Image (spheres, rainbow, N blue to C red):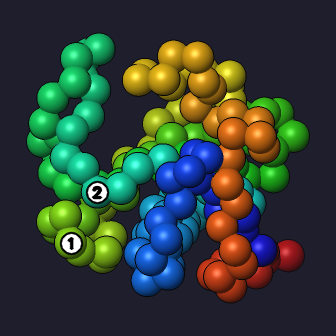
Amino acid sequence: MVRYYFYKGKMPTNPKDLQDMVALAYQTARDMKLYPRAILIRSKHHKTTTINGKTGEDPKGWHLTFCYKDNKQLINNTHTACHGYTKDEFSWELIESTHAGDKPDSVKRRFAKKSSVWPGPAELDEAPEIGYGHFPQS
């Protein structure tokens, strides 16, 4: 099973929104043909990004921001940040994904400088099991 996390207090209360976010997060991580073990859902739909240190409109449009970990990253306390692009702010169909390189969990969040991008368990809420995952190939 893949474990899904949100920053403390940011998990959607609407079960349908939660299910849609988890599905898009999983599809985004799997788009690289990886087998994620943990996914941090960092945002709702938005169309901004940071380019060369400046925040502005993302030329690729609406997306959600995630981080994921595979087995190796769980051991090494690292993660990969990614965007799952959709056609608009209401769509949950993955159109495209982008994936940044491996980063330490301790990297600080841009707008919450005191908090790490992937903080410890006390700063996260774990989503209930939704049954959306994969079976690793042998």
Q: Earlier in the sequence, mark 1 or mark 2?
A: 2
Vertical placement of residue 68 versus 104, above or below: below
Vertical placement of residue 71 versus 130, above or below: above
- Label 1 close to label 2 by CB (< 8 Å): yes
Residue position for label 1? 90
Q: Quadrant of the N terminus?
A: bottom right
Residue 54 point in image, percent of width and height: 22, 17
Q: Amino acid at mark 1?
A: Phe
Between 51 and 122, the one lying in front of the other is 122
Q: Residues within 10 Å of mark 1 (few under 14, many from 20)?
A: few
Vertical placement of residue 134 versus 26, above or below: below
User: Which type of secondary structure does the marked residue at label 1 adopt?
Assistant: loop
Residue position for label 2? 45
Between 86 and 19, the one lying in front of the other is 19
Residue 135 point in image, percent of width and height: 76, 81
Q: Residue at x 60, y 24 (%)?
A: 115
